[in-house]
Structures are given as structure tokens and as C-alpha cells.
Amino acid sequence: DVPKLLLGKRVLITAGPTREDIDPVRYITNHSSGKMGYALAQAAQKLGAEVTLVSGPVTLSPPSGVNILKVSSAEQMHTCVMQNVKNSDIFIGCAAVADYRPIQKNSQKIKKSDQELTLTFVKNPDILSDVAHLANAPFTLGFAAETQNIKQYALGKLQRKKLNMIAANDVSDENIGFNSEQNALTVFWPEGELKLEIADKNILATQLMELVAKRYTK
Ligand code: PMT
């Protein structure tokens, strides 16, 4: 049995990809499977937390004892998080949220023609940043999926988004990160950092939640 480091704490977690519709039959998305976020939800629940998981479209079964809310697009995920964050003690943004969406969703299927097709994209709201900038913000952990300059980019996100912690993922290594069983993370906070070596996502999730619990109570 694990010590209940997060007993009674309310933890809100996002997981999975988002899906940005182009027309009724097409969308753009990314390779997130939801495994990392679902593992974090289960780890937090085992540490005694009351967990709500806001999930993009994935094929995983919901973790036991966790309240799950399913969404599709980044805008839906943003609305859902903002409605549910108010009583949260801890927020973790593990979802791979699309930074952009097609400027319009065509109500009819786009027909093939002899011309080139150009799609224009507009920026999506940044869920993590909006949560961390709330007047009564919860303890906020973000992720940073990077293919280069990992530390520099992660620290940039930590500061710009006003986070308490950030877990950096080197997604140039295809054995870890998106849609793999294992992951490795370097976690940064204003006064320190910790490397979590490559391991199954559920093991890593427990290590990360224990670190969150430790920093949260500081
Ligand atoms: O789902 P898996 O297959 O298990 O893979 C796990 C993972 C690689 C997806 C995960 O570990 C991870 O790194 N998640 C974050 C992916 C990402 O979108 O990173 P980013 O560097 O683009 O975004 C930075 C942070 O801002 C993230 O916490 C993200 O959730 C958040 N964000 C980004 C854009 C946006 N519009 N809203 C956000 O909240």
C-alpha cells in the first residue's frame, strides 16, 4: 500500500490529443495516445486524490476510481477545464493540445478539384497558461514536448505560462513520448530539477506524482 500523499486533494488532469475538424469527414490531430495522462490520473488516485481526467479521443479504458470527461477539440477541452478547475488543488496539463485549428469548419465535405488546396489556421486558446494565470490558480504542472533545445524551451514555458513545474519530454527519441509504452522526463521548477530515467509510463507517473505532492506541500 502506498502512503496517501494526496489524500483528499482535488487533481484535474488533461490527457490525449485533440481533434480539429476540417469538414464533416476530416480532421487534424497528433500522435498522443493518452497513456501518460491516464497513468498520471491512476497514480494520483492511488495516492488518495479525487481525480478528474479531461480526455481527448483515445482508445484507452478509463482508470478506476477516476471521474472522466471526454472532449474532442482544443476549444472543448478549454471550456471543460475552465468549468472544472475552480475547486482543484492541482492541475496537470499532459494533453497534446493542437496549437491551431482550421479557421472554419466546412459544413459540407470539401470536394476534390484540380486546384491546390490551402487551409488557414487560427490559434487555439492555451489551456495550461489560462489555468496558471487564474487569480486563484491551482498548483500547476505543464509538459513540454520538444525535439531540440529541451531545457531552454521547457524553462521558457515554465516562466511564460507561470507554472509551478514543467516535465520536459524529448520527443525526438521515438522509444519514448508519443504513443510508446515508456517515457523519460526531466522535471524543472524555479529552484531545481530532477531527471526521471526511462521507465514504463505507470512507474514514471507514480514518481512524478510523488514529486508533485512533495513540491505542492512546500
Ligand atoms: O499521450 P502519450 O502517447 O502517452 O504521450 C505523452 C505526451 C508525449 C503527449 C506527453 O508526455 C506530453 O509531452 N504532453 C504535452 C504535449 C504538448 O502538447 O506539449 P507542448 O510543448 O506543445 O505544450 C506545452 C504545454 O502546454 C503542455 O502541458 C500542453 O498540455 C499545454 N497546452 C498547449 C497548447 C494549448 N493550446 N493548450 C495547452 O494547454
Image: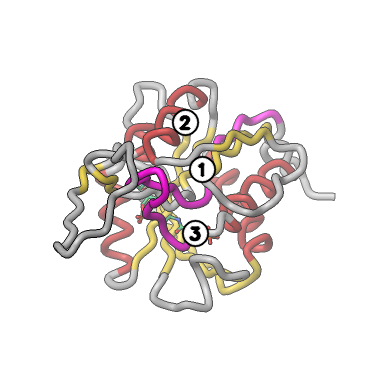
At 45% from the left and 57% from the top, the residue drawn is 167
Residue type pointed to by label 3: Ser
- The verdict on residue 106 being magenta is no
Report the span colored magenta. Answer: 8-31
Secondary structure under the numbered disc 3 in the rendered image: loop
Find residue 43 and report its horizontal and vertical position in percent: 68, 49
Q: Amino acid at mark 1?
A: Thr
Closest to the observer: 2 or 96?
Answer: 96
- The residue at 52%/69% (across/down) is 184
Residue lying farthest to the right in this orientation: 1
Q: Quick check: is the Cβ at mark 1 less than 8 Å away from ligand 1?
A: yes
Q: Which residue is mark 1?
A: 14
Pointers 1 and 3 in contact (C-beta within 8 Å) = no
How packed is label 1: few (under 14 Cα within 10 Å), some, or many (20 or more)? many
Front residue (pair 103, 36): 103
Question: Where is 200 relative to 21, above or below?
Answer: below
Magenta run includes residue 17: yes
Q: Which residue is mark 2?
A: 81
**Label 3, on which residue?**
32
The verdict on label 3 being within 8 Å of ligand 1 is: yes
Earlier in the chain: of badge 2 and badge 1, it is 1
Residue at 45 percent of width and 65 percent of height:
186
User: Label 3 crowding class (10 Å Cα cut-off): few <14, some 14-19, many 20+?
Assistant: many
Q: Looking at the image, do the residues carrying marks 2 and 1 touch, with CB atoms under 8 Å apart?
A: yes
- Say which label, 2 or 3, has the lower sequence index: 3
* C-alpha separation, residue under disc 2 versus residue under disc 1: 8 Å
Near-viewer residue (27 or 177): 27
